[in-house]
Every structure is written in structure tokens, then in C-alpha cells.
Image (tube, grey):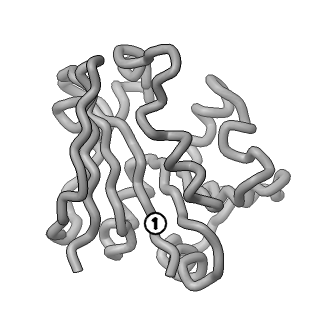
Amino acid sequence: MRKISLFIAMSLDGYIAKPNDDLSFLNLVQREGEDYGYAKFTDSIDTLIIGRKTYDYVLKHVSASHYDNGQRDVYVITRTQRPKIGRTTFFTGRLPDLVKRLKSEAGKNIYCDGGAEVINELLKHDLIDEFIISVIPVLLGEGTRLFKDGRPERQLELVQVKTFDTGLTQLHYKKKQ
């Protein structure tokens, strides 16, 4: 069965974005030739789930091909119906239903790249199987929290911890069976 993985970066105090969806703090650990395992991770997936705000940010600041590279299906979770673009589907239904359907289909793993609303909806329904969280050595003080209140308690099992000379620490957990 396919698994759904979260691969995301946050500040030491638990924020994935500064106010106004500002991701500039990620630049603190950007180094030429260092992707912190992102390319290897994305080789293991063929489907991506992402929130509309995160998708719009990447469209504006990176490019649409960052997600829809012709090699994977992209599901943008949104409240507004939009026509499909390439392999990108704008999904307005129930997220748990989509994930359960995708997990039951053949294919590689599924990647959730945020945002916080999508992540927390998946957590409420116990649908994330693996957590790869890169901790950036900065205290932001405010912004968008990775984990919101109101979700069930979950036990996780540590798979691996990696440290990098930039100060980034990458925590890899899987759902405890």
C-alpha cells in the first residue's frame, strides 16, 4: 500500500512560515549543491497533495513545473473549482476521501507539501504515515504553526536524525503501528 509522507521545514519554534506566508527564513540554510535529501525523496513519489495557498506561493516565487513536472499527479486542495491544468487537479471534495482513494491505487508514494490546514486535516484522520521535518535554527516568534491544536494524539517512531553543517537538523519519524 502507498504511504503518504510529509517532507517540510519549520523553525525551531514550530513555524512553517512567517506572517504573510513569508518563507524567507528558509534561505538561512540554502547552500549550493545541498538539497537535504529532497531529490532522493521526490524520486520515491508520483503524487503530490498541496494546499492552494502553498501552491500559489510556489507558482509566484518558483514555477508551476516545481510541482507539475510531467512525472507526477498534483492535487491542489481548494474550495474553488478550477479546470485541470496538465497533471494538476484542483480538488474541492473531502480530503480524507481523496487520500484513501489514492492510497488504494497502485503507484509510488504520496507527498504532502503543506500547508498547515492540509497537514492538520490529514492528522485529524490519521492519514500521514511518515514525517520528515527539517528544523531550521531560528526562532521566528510568530507565523503559521506546523501543528495546530485540536488533533488526536499520535505516537511516532524515530527512523533517523541527520544534522548538517548549516545547523539544519532533519527528523525522520514514521507512524507507530
Q: Position of residue 30 (x, y in %)?
A: 43, 17
For image coordinates 60% across by 68% down, the residue present is 108
Please report the residue visible at 58 percent of the width from the left and 47 percent of the height from the top: 52
Q: Which residue is mark 1?
A: 4
Q: Nearer the viewer, residue 41 or 137?
A: 41
User: Is residue 173 positioned above or below 60 on the image?
Assistant: below
* Quadrant location of the C terminus in the rendered image: bottom left
Q: Is residue 59 above or below residue 137?
A: below
Image-based side of 105 in relation to 1, left or right: right
Q: Residues within 10 Å of mark 1 (few under 14, many from 20)?
A: many
Q: Which residue lies at the image location 18% right of the left edge and 65% below the top edge?
A: 157
Q: Is 96 situated above or below 36?
A: below
Residue 75, position in %: x, y? 64, 59
Instruction: Tell me the residue at 36%/18% (across/down).
Output: 29
- Residue type beneath disc 1: Ile
Q: From the viewer's perspective, is 101 left or right of 73?
A: left
Q: Which element carries disc 1, helix, strand or loop? A: strand
- Between 111 and 140, which is closer to the camera in this rendering? 111
Task: Residue 120 in the image: state x and y as whole percent.
Answer: 34, 59
Spot occupied by residue 21 in the image (x, y as percentages of width and height): 44, 29
Residue 64 quadrant: top right
Q: Quadrant location of residue 103? A: bottom right
